[in-house]
Amino acid sequence: MADLSPESVAAIAGLYELDDRGRHEAWLGRVRTDREVISLLAEAPIPLEQGVIDVHGLVNRPARERWQSRPLAADGESSGPPRTAGQQAAAVQSGETSAVDLVEEALESAHRQRHLNAFIALFEERAREEADAVDRRVWGGEEVGPLAGVTVAVKDLIDVEGYATTGGTRVLDLAPAREDAACVARLRRAGAVILGMANLHGLAYGALSFNPDFGRVLNPRREEALSGGSSGGSGAAVAAGITAGALGTDTGGSVRVPAACCGVVGLKPTFGRVSTAGVYPLGRTMDHVGPVTRTVADAALFLEVLSDEPFAASTTAWRDLDGVVVGVPRTYFFDHLSDEVRAAVEDCERAVVEAGGEVIEADIPSMRFAPAAQLFTIAADALDVHRQMLARKADLLPEDVRLRLEMGMFFLAADYVRAQRLRGMLQKDVDAALEKADVLLMPTTAVTAPDAGVREVRVGDVTWPTQLALSRLTMPFTATGHPALTLPWGSDDRGCPVGLQIVGRPMEEAAILGTGRVLERTRGAAG
């Protein structure tokens, strides 16, 4: 890390054309806050022969054949109105309901729950027109896609044609998008209807979904609690029943954290599995696009639409976990947990065994260094993306986002390279654990959603900033690129959900989705 004497700080700020007046104390305070994580980079025992991580090569790893031939069970029939994306699409395709009706219901729900601040913009007339087009195709006997009429919220970091992406801040000031992001285009081709743009933590750089420009996203499960972030609006829209699904981005946990806080399902696919073309970046070497849904089967349905090739090819379905080995890494992930979260994981382990699976201990020796790999990577990557805006409009940014961006200028090139080598070591250690287990199981967050305004969380004998308490257990897998799924597993005495995380080998989303689907069914989820 760079020398932080007043003279050095001023000189470094000058290199980035930043005004350092009145900022020194804030910068030094942030360094003090992150001191423990910063020190981990130097302490990490990285072998001399360890190269930098190759995240772009993950999509070239072949999935093992056993997962290609064992896909999911679909959601079951609903006795009431269709709730899940799969049920909604089936109802539209059969004529049981219309896409227009689904859109009207979603818009009514969005207006009724406007106070949640889940949306920055609603596309009311456009959504009605798109739904009408879907219905006309159905009535005309044309083939419609697997998401026919399904309403979707899109995180306002992802381009939608004709809309000026805000990134959750009025500072970005982009021109209206000329075309849909690749992921949005895929959803539209599958028949989905884009209802609107979901609110988020500014520039996707935070886990709380505080937003001074567009309002804090409230948690539908407990409005006083945080919704998680950065894709807080995506999580809230699905949890509130406004839309059947949503798109989010995940650079440190930003799909999984809000899904866990709001009690829904969130999937971060393998790095590179889903295109980020048309997505405003935060950290290009860790940015992922993934769905937030009500059920695991819906997450699988969205992934099939979003990815380049289907992963569920045969007709047999997961009904149990017979032959599935679930590894549980006790170190790091279980060092500091709230009582409710710890009890939920133990309950889930019992459910694995009851479903026919085997639970084993998993060892990931380098995991305690993961926060350093994340911090040194995202700090540099994010500054690279936002450097010009920071130089011109720093005073207009939310203070927490501005401070995180500014910190990137104090990390050395050698620090960044070492962080990439550390990511490579982490990736190898996770791969090794997944040689002995089919999937890994751990909590998604160390605590349930704290109430808004809580700046620090005490867990056992440690006190963490709320941001770290929510993202500490998700960030390792954006650093390594492994696919990770979160699903709800009970709640605390305030009604705030607990989220559990299932991690698999690169390109083996079928394994984590299948495991998650069986576990979800044991708790009486839809289907």
Image (spheres, helix red, strand yellow):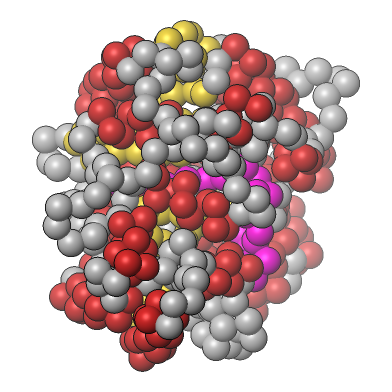
Does residue 149 show up? yes
Q: As drawn, is 69 to the left or to the right of 218?
A: right
Placement of 310 over or under 161, stated as above or below = above
Determine the residue positioned at 53% across, 51% down: 303
Q: Residue at x 43, y 83 (%)?
A: 140
- Quadrant of the rendered structure where residue 192 is? bottom left
Q: Position of residue 275 (x, y in %)?
A: 66, 59
Residue 367: horizontal and vertical position, in percent?
A: 58, 23
User: Which of the 4 image quadrants contains residue 176?
Assistant: bottom right
| 363 lies above or below 152 | above
Horizontal relation, residue 475 to residue 179: left or right: left
Q: Is residue 202 visible?
A: no
The C terminus: image quadrant: top left
For the N terminus, the quadrant is top right
**Residue 319 pos. (x, y %):** 37, 27
250 or 472, nearer to the observer: 250
Total numbered labels placed on residues in the image: 0
The rendered magenta stretch, by its main secondary structure, is classed as loop
Q: Residue at x 54, y 78 (%)?
A: 160
Return the residue found at the far right.
49
On screen, residue 294 above or below 349: below
Q: Is residue 512 left or right of residue 17?
A: left
Q: Magenta segment, which residues?
A: 263-282
- Is residue 125 a member of the stretch shown in magenta? no
